Image (spheres, grey):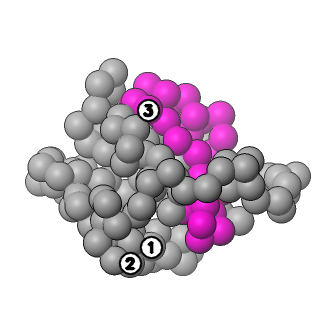
Amino acid sequence: MPKILVIEDNNLIRETVLELLESRGFEAVGAENGQVGIETAIAQIPDLILSDVMMPELNGLEVFAILRSHPATASIPFIFMTGSEIEKAIELKADGYLQKPCSVAVILQAIATQLEKPKITNPKHQKLQDNSASQNPSKRARNQKPRFEIASLCSQ
């Protein structure tokens, strides 16, 4: 099950995206700001990162630059989610861009496109696979009913 890190300072958006991802079979991890996002990415090496652009601590553009310069995270596909800073995000040549608000279908297609790309074969930048992860649904998925309707933030 692919692991996706969602870096988003808006609690409602972050939790909604996490719930969407978990409902579609992804392991989803959240970070409330750029600094926590960097720490989480380095510690957990996700398969993909979704990141807001405008955030406190470190913004998404800074997060992208730092993670691209770190050997363990340099090859992780990175998709920006933004409502207003799309031009700056495009300049950095991230792997994808989502304009907020966006549909569930658009989010899932952007993720699928990135996860289907061939992986970099340079051993210095290759992610290690952790096969010890449990195949059970996450604790959030098992113990909670969705708190938010996806449609409240994204159109279906």
The amino acid type, in three-letter code, at marker 2 is Ala
Residue 27 falls inside the magenta stretch: yes
Element assignment for label 2: helix
Name the residue carrying label 1.
108
Q: Is residue 14 depicted above or below 22 in this figure? A: above
Q: Quadrant of residue 156?
A: bottom left
Q: Is residue 97 above or below residue 62?
A: below
Q: Where is residue 3 in the image (x, y as percent from the top left)?
A: 63, 56
Local SS, label 3: loop
Amino acid type indicated by mark 1 = Leu
Q: Amino acid type of disc 3?
A: Glu
Distance from the alpha carbon under mark 3 to that under mark 2: 24 Å
Q: Is residue 102 left or right of 77 when viewed as pictured?
A: left
Q: Can residue 110 be seen in this view?
A: no
Q: Can residue 16 be seen in this view?
A: yes
Magenta segment boundaries in residue numbering = 21-45
Quickly name the residue at label 3: 32
| Camera-side residue of 124 and 128 | 128
Residue found at x 12% / y 49%: 84
The residue tagged with tag 1: helix, strand or loop? Answer: helix
Q: Position of residue 6 (x, y in %)?
A: 47, 47
Residue 16: mark in rendering: none
Dot 2 and dot 1 residues touching (CB under 8 Å): yes
Measure the alpha-carbon separation of dots 1 and 3: 21 Å
The answer for how far apart the CA atoms under marks 2 and 1 are is 5 Å
Q: Mark 2 points at which residue?
A: 105
